[in-house]
Image (tube, coloured by chain):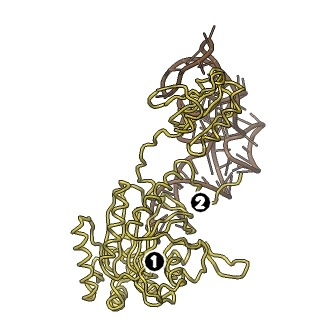
Amino acid sequence: MIQSLRGMKDLLADESERYIYFVENCSKIAKNYGFSYVETPILEETALFKRSVGESSDIVGKEMYQFTDKGGNDVCMRPEGTAGVVRAFIQKKYDKAKVQKKFFYYGPMFRYERPQKGRLREFHQFGVESFNQPNIKEDAAIILMLKEILEFFGIGYKLELNSLGCTACMPPYKENLVNFLKNEDEICDDCKRRRDTNPIRVLDCKNQNCQDIYANAPLLLDNLCPTCRDEFEQLKNILDDFDVNYTVNPKLVRGLDYYNKTAFEFVSDDIGAQSAIAGGGRYDKLVEYLDGKPTTGIGFAMGIERLMELIVMPEPKRKGYYVGALCDEALDISFKLATKMRKNKITTINYDKKSLKAHLKNADKQNAKYCVCIGEDELQKDLLWIKDLETKEEKSITQEELLGR
RNA sequence: GUGAGUGUAGCUCAGUUGGUUAGAGCAUCGGGUUGUGGUUCCGAGGGUCGUGGGUUCGAUUCCCAUCAUUCACCCCA
């Protein structure tokens, strides 16, 4: 038997219902915030992710589905959504037009990792990106929108917040941190590697010994330039105004290299070790990294599979019609009837002759609201028998009456 | 990439200290006398016990390998 690839799952039955329910409602909320749908290709040139996500990240370094296509191009399946949207933004020359744009997207992402709870090789993200809106209120609006989405689905969360600074304050801080790390020989091998490739990531190390050492490490939050410090204060004030609960985590860093200034992560306690349900932040330099004109950007991405474990679906209601025949003569007639009904009603039909009891049982199992049956009596009188499975009300009506309902 | 656990019916699992026809619940299908569902009762179908090899008179059971899967590390949404 041929099976789906490791870490890749089919979406069907309850799961697909959940998926549709989730993205539809997220889309609705995003549209209220002025975002419009964008869909970018799953396959992109590998260089796009190397230059945006960063070669030092694990995502690009070891988790990409990368290959050479028949034309000899170095391509890969997107491991995240932002890079493609930024590429599309630049390709459409919105950077030169200096226009504000807000996009939302959802779809599959691919990372070659060892699967576990909340982590698949093909997984789905819902995300938004807002370009050319440097106002700190936009940062707040995006967090408020995420809060609204999570609250709509009844998902509990914790919000962690940090500022990663800008080109004025980040480089001196980085130097500062590297100097601190040079004097520490007890840090783990991973951290030693990070010291050279991406020093800020050491702060995020899960190793307890490392964390003990970093208790004395310089923090970026204490070394922000006046502008960044002021903006971070404003952001916190707005969030306070809107009763958003958050904790400032000066050691929160994002896994992708393109972030600066505002960085945030929504975390859940209820889904195992892979607890990050949404993350995002500002990326004011990314458009330039990808050869666009200077354009600020901010966005977030949510892990749909992780969130689907947490959402409570509304109770399924009985709906639609079930059609069944009680005698052989009614088989063709019921099929014709069902086909007419399908113009404007959800209709399922059973092709076999069965007892009324069996049809009612089937209709009930399929969660239909009405059971329509045709038997000898109905054929004689040219009527249909119909029962409401909720109210138990039953009556005989003509075909015209039924089709006109 | 590393570690641990698990693979028996469509699903959830029991079981065999190695021995004839491998069990349960749920689900499915049929029935409980003339055309009334979600309850109940009776019955039926469905398994080369993940795959390959080894030990043995004999393996679903023990051993090895392999594949799949789960959880954790790591990484991240």
The residue positioned 63% from the left and 41% from the top of the image is: A340
Q: Amino acid at mark 2?
A: Met
Q: Tag 1: Cα neighbours inside 10 Å, few (<14), some, or many (≥20)?
A: some
Q: Which residue is mark 1?
A: A256
Q: Is residue B61 above or below residue A390?
A: below
> Which chain is displayed in yellow in the rendered image?
A
Q: Secondary structure at mark 2?
A: loop
Q: Which sits earlier in the primary sequence, circle 1 or circle 2?
A: 2
Q: Quadrant of residue B67?
A: bottom right
Q: Is residue A188 above or below residue B29?
A: below
Q: Is residue A181 above or below residue A338?
A: below
Residues flagged by tags 1 and 2 on a common chain: yes
Front residue of A208 and A222:
A222
Chain B takes which shade in the image? brown
Front residue of B77 and A399:
A399
Q: CA distance from mark 1 to mark 2?
A: 23 Å
Q: Which residue is mark 2?
A: A8
Q: Secondary structure at mark 1?
A: loop
